[in-house]
Every structure is written in structure tokens, then in C-alpha cells.
Image: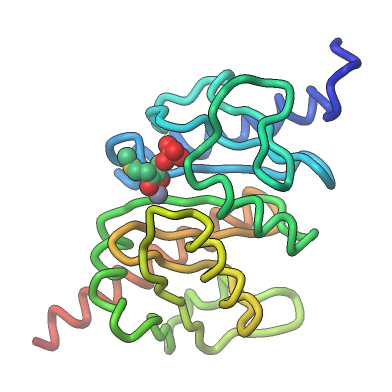
Amino acid sequence: MNTALPYDPQRLAHCAGEIIVNVRELSALGWTPATSSNFSQRLDGQHVAITVSGRDKGKLVESDIMVVDLDGAPVATAQKSSAETLLHTQLYKRFPEIGCVLHTHSQTQTVASRLYSGQGHVHLEGYELLKAFADNTTHEMSVELPVLPNSQDMHTLAAQVDALLDRQCMWGYLIDGHGLYAWGRDMAEARRHLEAFEFLLACELELRRLQR
Ligand SMILES: CSCCC(=O)C(=O)COP(=O)(O)O
Ligand SMILES: [Zn+2]
């Protein structure tokens, strides 16, 4: 064991395994086309396991998961982390309870982001599946899923997200023409939120189509 590492390598191996298994399943659904999407899990109070930039997310292996600190700087590696690392670390930095962040580019998420960008959010109401966002004490009756303008400048995007989080507490957001970010206390919860958003967005798109 390399005792010089500032994080627990066994925890990294565990998180990498969880990321690989879950992302393969998301990829098989067609939610990570053309090397898009990125995924992370918190290792401890200072470190995050995150996907290496540009990898085929459907074929991840352990060496495709690396460690960054909460400012997004690589730790004990020369690998390049996801181009969108800052969008992950800003969440871990701000909310100690967040343990997992998932970002995908499904067709449903991307089309919905385009359709609702003018409105700035997607209003989700009247669905039993909204219970996927409820904790033990509250029963969510409606959810506003924010839609942010896209930018190639991650600092601009991260500033938009920070401003949003000042006003509103939520489990995800869309980026226009880009995809969805969703998170949770652990992989299971983040995945439940991601799948619930995907399903609810698909319902909204279908309703719009039928109502035309
Ligand atoms: C080819 S997709 C463009 C970048 C992107 O949006 C994405 O999610 C993947 O970027 P990464 O650097 O994490 O591979
Ligand atoms: Zn992306």
C-alpha cells in the first residue's frame, strides 16, 4: 500500500467499481453518447473520485477514474480530469452531504433543455414519481428543474450554478443543448434522481407532442 497517498486507496477502488458498474448501465441506455458525460463520488472531506476526460464512458476501467481535490486539482496523478470537474467539485465543496454527482447527455435531457431554456426551468407536477425526490420528512408535490444557458467557460457555468443554489435547493439542473446534472447522498440516491428526471422529462415531452 502506498502510504504517501493523501486519500484511502481502498475507498478509491470501491468508488471506481461503483462508478464503472453504474455508468456502464447508463451508457447501455444511450445516455452517454460519443464520450460525453462525467461521473464522480466523494472519497472523503477533501477528495473526489472522478472520470478522466474524453474516455468512452461505456467502457470505463479502473484507470479511467482519478482523484481531484475540492478545487478540482489532480491529486497524485498526471491524468486530466473531466472538462466539467468544476461543476462536480462546487457541489461537494458547498454541500458536505453530497456523495455522488452524475452528468449525462441523453436525447430526452438534451431536447428538453432546448425546449425549456427560454422559460429557464421545467415545472414537474402531478407525477407519482416525484416521490423519488422526497426524503423521510417531506413529500415533494412539484419540482422546478432549472435550465441554465450553456457555456464553454466552466467558471461561467459554475457561477450560474452557485447563484442558483443561493436561491433554490434542488437535486439537479439542465444545461441548454447539453445535458443533465443530478446528485445525491450516495450513488443509489443520485441514480434514483437521475432516472426520475429522465422519466419525468420524457413524460413532459410526450405530453407536449400529444397536445400539439
Ligand atoms: C464529447 S462531449 C463534450 C464534453 C462534455 O460535455 C462531457 O460531458 C464530457 O466531457 P469529459 O471531459 O468529462 O469527457
Ligand atoms: Zn457534458
Q: Position of residue 179 (x, y in %)?
A: 37, 58
Q: Quadrant of the N terminus?
A: top right
Q: Residue at x 79, y 23 (%)?
A: 9
Q: Residue at x 44, y 54 (%)?
A: 153
Q: Residue at x 61, y 20 (%)?
A: 78
Q: Position of residue 14 (x, y in %)?
A: 71, 29
The residue furthest right is 3
Q: Residue at x 63, y 28 (%)?
A: 66
The residue furthest left is 212
Figure quadrant of residue 133 = bottom right
Question: Observer-nearest residue: 195 or 70?
Answer: 70
In this rendering, the answer to whether 196 lies above or below 126 is above
In this rendering, the answer to whether 145 lies above or below 34 is below
In this rendering, the answer to whether 189 lies above or below 171 is above
Q: Quadrant of the C terminus?
A: bottom left
Q: Position of residue 84 (x, y in %)?
A: 50, 47
Along the horizontal axis of the image, is 188 left or right of 43? left
